Image (cartoon, rainbow, N blue to C red):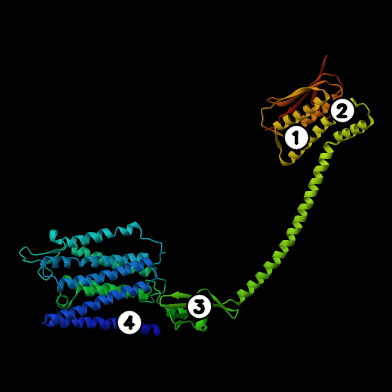
């Protein structure tokens, strides 16, 4: 009832103003006193300008979609402009040519408004970022072309044709309608009907509830008026005012669409709050006087509502109050957050428990890491101990021998041998640790190992050298280790006999060959078990031991 009463009041107020304006128009036509007639027409014009302007402002405030709102405001501006042009034409222009061109300019709002209505119907339901496709923008071409043909009618007379013998071309004289006029009339009716049909199809099922015919009323009135205008009916010529009539019918068409919900607006608060039976919703004015309220809305003090302006207010550890500013007041809504607060507290406790548990897990993890580190160190130590145990025992034996000797030269030789063996142990451990990190090693690492061993051999007065010619930058770690082990085993076998010792490592397409030469002769059969591919060449002044290692997976 409240909603219907408000609509009735609005309609009645507008109707009374229109009737009053019509009465002023009729009175001004019958009063011969110019100042009074001019004053009455000024009041009448002001009423229409005020009505159209007020509607534009309310449409801007009510319509939700920004692009639609812009077009409706533009329609309001066109109607106001039309009324002003019409009043200026009748009251202040005495030149027949200027009056005629102002008459032609009527068709600017007459043709643009139906087109804007069509654009509005297409935009309905789209996002704020949506823009009309280019094919719709092309519809400006026939509209602007028709407007241009009306403005230039004096040149071609395709819109209005004046008699050849007419002294003055005027809308008040004798003239006939041309093809452009009829095309413009059809174009306007087409755009209006298309706009209404698109709006109806876009509306939700059941939304109109049999009222879809209401927007047809303004369209039918326009068609009837155009027919009477073309036939130059006395009803139109005596009482008609084309600017006022079309302005009211156009505005009525859009207003009906807004009231029916074809054009979405933010004025249906009554329906909203009626449907919000289980929600606490309120709209208040700027002084927190309640204007709309749902049946489930709770009452709060003004102090509480003001405190909720900056951020939501929690009241009684149960209700959260929201306060959002809107045009002319505030939107208030409240929600029961007791269960949410309870869950939040549970989550807080669970988070604290998880933090303690994570700390325990972290400590346990650190203990595991420390334990694994120790185990890994022990494993590596045992592995290093295992692979170099023979050399370690040899060094230990030589150390015992050193303590039993009194000859200084023999002691120095034992120390030199220990240095040679120690060099091997050092490099062997280096290769072994590197193998834990990477399956490949730089070939220069083998050269560095040979370099250190031959520096130690000089302490034993053993001359010689090494050569490494390997085409590959990287070699498998086990291959390098095997070559260095072979070198060391041969060296340890002849270390007490040889005065000359040389090693060469050369790569071929199929293998890597290690060649060791020295200037003494000894038995190497015990090494065949460890190096089955070993070959021995005996010469008069020494021996050459060869070992070929398949390239296999060498990079």
Q: Which percent across, then down, holds residue 325?
A: 45, 75
Pointer 1 local density, CA inside 10 Å: few below 14, some 14–19, many at least 20: some
CA distance separating discs 1 and 3: 77 Å
CA distance separating discs 3 and 2: 99 Å
Pointer 4 local density, CA inside 10 Å: few below 14, some 14–19, many at least 20: few
**Residue at image point 71% right, 62% down:** 358
Pointer 2 or 1: first along the chain:
2
Give the labeled residue for mark 4.
Answer: 10
Q: Which percent across, then down, holds residue 123?
A: 37, 65
Q: Is residue 363 left or right of residue 407?
A: left
CA distance separating discs 3 and 4: 29 Å
CA distance separating discs 4 and 1: 98 Å
Secondary-structure class at tag 2: helix
**Residue 484, visible in the rendered structure:** yes
Pointer 3 or 2: first along the chain:
3
Give the labeled residue for mark 3.
Answer: 333
Q: Nearer the viewer, mark 2 or mark 1?
A: 2
Q: Quadrant of residue 355?
A: bottom right
Q: Quadrant of the N terminus?
A: bottom left
Q: Is residue 15 left or right of residue 64?
A: left
Residue sticking out furthest to the top: 540
CA distance separating discs 4 and 2: 123 Å
Secondary-structure class at tag 1: helix
Give the labeled residue for mark 1.
Answer: 478
Q: Which percent across, then down, holds residue 553?
A: 70, 33
Q: Nearer the viewer, mark 4 or mark 2?
A: 2
Q: Quadrant of the C terminus?
A: top right
Secondary-structure class at tag 3: strand
Q: In the depicted view, which residue is nearer to us: 424 or 117?
A: 424
Q: Which percent across, then down, holds residue 127?
A: 42, 64
Give the labeled residue for mark 2.
Answer: 412
């Amino acid at each position: 009832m409240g909603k219907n009463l408000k609509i009735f009041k609005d309609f009645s107020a507008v109707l009374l103003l229109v009737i009053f304006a019509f009465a002023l128009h009729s009175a001004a036509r019958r009063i011969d006193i110019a100042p009074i007639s001019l004053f009455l027409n000024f009041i009448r014009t002001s009423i229409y300008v005020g009505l159209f302007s007020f509607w534009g402002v309310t449409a801007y405030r009510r319509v939700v979609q920004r692009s639609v709102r812009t077009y409706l405001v533009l329609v309001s501006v066109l109607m106001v402009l039309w009324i002003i042009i019409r009043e200026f034409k009748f009251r202040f222009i005495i030149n027949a040519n200027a009056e005629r061109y102002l008459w032609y300019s009527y068709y600017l709002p007459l043709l643009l408004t139906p087109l804007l209505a069509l654009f509005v119907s297409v935009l309905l339901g789209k996002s704020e970022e949506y823009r009309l496709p280019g094919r719709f923008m092309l519809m400006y071409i026939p509209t602007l072309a028709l407007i241009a043909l009306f403005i230039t009618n004096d040149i071609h007379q395709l819109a209005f044709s004046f008699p050849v013998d007419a002294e003055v071309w005027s809308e008040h004289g004798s003239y006939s309608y041309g093809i452009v006029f009829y095309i413009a009339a059809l174009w306007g009716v087409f755009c209006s009907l298309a706009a209404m049909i698109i709006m109806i199809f876009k509306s939700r099922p059941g939304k109109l509830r049999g009222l879809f015919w209401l927007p047809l009323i303004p369209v039918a009135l326009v068609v009837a008026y155009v027919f009477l205008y073309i036939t130059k009916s006395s009803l139109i010529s005596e009482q008609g005012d084309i600017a006022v009539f079309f302005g009211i019918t156009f505005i009525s068409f859009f207003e009906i669409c807004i009231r029916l919900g074809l054009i979405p607006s933010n004025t249906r608060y009554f329906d909203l709050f009626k449907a919000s039976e289980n929600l606490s919703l309120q709209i208040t004015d700027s002084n927190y006087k309640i204007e709309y309220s749902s049946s489930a809305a709770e009452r709060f003090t003004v102090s509480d509502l003001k405190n909720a302006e900056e951020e939501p207010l929690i009241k009684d550890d149960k209700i959260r109050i929201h306060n959002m500013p809107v045009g002319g007041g505030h939107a208030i809504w409240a929600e029961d957050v007791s269960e949410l607060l309870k869950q939040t507290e549970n989550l807080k406790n669970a988070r604290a428990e998880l933090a303690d548990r994570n700390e325990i897990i972290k400590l346990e993890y650190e203990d595991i890491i420390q334990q694994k580190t120790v185990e890994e160190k022990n494993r590596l130590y045992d592995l290093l101990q295992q692979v170099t145990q023979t050399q370690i025992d040899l060094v230990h034996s030589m150390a015992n021998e050193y303590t039993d000797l009194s000859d200084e030269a023999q002691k120095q030789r034992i120390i030199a041998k220990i240095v040679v063996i120690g060099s091997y142990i050092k490099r062997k451990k280096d290769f072994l640790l590197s193998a834990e990190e990477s399956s490949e090693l730089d070939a220069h690492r083998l050269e560095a190992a040979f370099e250190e061993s031959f520096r130690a051999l000089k302490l034993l007065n053993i001359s010689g050298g090494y050569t490494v010619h390997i085409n590959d930058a990287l070699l498998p770690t086990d291959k390098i280790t095997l070559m260095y082990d072979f070198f060391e085993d041969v060296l340890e076998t002849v270390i007490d006999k040889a005065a000359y010792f040389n090693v060469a490592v050369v790569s071929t397409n199929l293998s890597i060959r290690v060649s060791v030469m020295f200037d003494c002769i000894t038995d190497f059969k015990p090494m065949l078990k460890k190096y089955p591919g070993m070959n021995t060449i005996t010469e008069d002044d020494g021996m050459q031991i060869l070992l070929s290692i398949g390239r296999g997976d060498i990079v």
